[in-house]
Image (cartoon, rainbow, N blue to C red):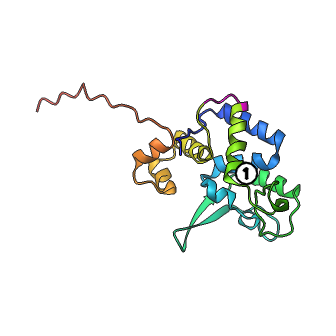
Amino acid sequence: MQFVEPIRSKEKILEIKAILKKKNFRDYVLFSLGINSGLKIHDLLNLRIKDVLTEEGFVKEYIDVPFHGEDIQRFHISRICKSAISDYLQNRSYDSLDEPLFVSKKQNKGKQPLLRQQAYKIINDAARLAGLTERIGTHTLRKTFGYHAYQSGVPVEQIQKMFHHSSPNATLHYIGVVPKQRDHSSIDLNL
């Protein structure tokens, strides 16, 4: 697996969202939820409608994802994503809340989840159309979330815990942040 980069530019994020929204609203929702939640691509692609929508038809506040057996990890659904999910499901036909949220048009009449390879192509194609030349892949969504969370002031330890990384440095490396080199040349204790 190749190392992929986060999308660091907010302008490029907006450009990619516009490209995806124009091309396929499902893809726009996938991208938006990915960069705003921190979910792994596996978890994103395995979401069911019931994971984001109540029986009454309202978009939930959180997505609960099983983690290591009986534990549950909770991911917030942002205001932007709530609106996108609501619009997407109002314009998409489904028979059951148990259907995949992101259905593949190529598989079994739309009742199968989008495949990882399809998601990769969607994300990569949109990034290229937006002029990005860095390595982009499905992990770019999660890395973009982590990068912008860190840049907005979320402590690296909180992101580390969310991503289940072994250390803050592992998280910084994962989200593409190079720690600033410390200058120790002026330390003159004269004890």
Q: Residue at x 45, y 54 (%)?
A: 165
Task: Give above or below for 39 relative to 187.
Answer: below
Q: Is 130 part of what is drawn in magenta?
A: yes
Residue nearer the viewer, 150 or 30: 30
Seen as rendered, the residue at the extreme bottom is 70
Task: Give above or below for 39 relative to 69.
Answer: above
Residue 49's image quarter? Answer: bottom right
Crowdedness near tag 1: few (<14), some (14–19) or many (≥20) residues, C-alpha within 10 Å: many
Q: Main secondary structure of the magenta part?
A: loop
Task: Give above or below for 120 relative to 125.
Answer: below
Horizontal side of 41 relative to 105 (left or right) equals: left
- Image coordinates of residue 47 in percent, x first then y, are 70, 62
> Which quarter of the rendering shows the C terminus?
top left
- Image coordinates of residue 37 in percent, x first then y, are 63, 52
Residue nearer the viewer, 34 or 121: 121
Q: What span is in magenta? A: 129-133
Q: Residue at x 76, y 45 (%)?
A: 28
Query: Mark 1 falls on what kind of element?
Result: helix
Is residue 5 visible from the viewing direction of this image? yes
- Image coordinates of residue 105 in percent, x first then y, are 82, 54
Q: Amino acid at mark 1?
A: Cys
Q: Is 27 part of what is drawn in magenta?
A: no
Residue that numbered label 1 is attached to = 81
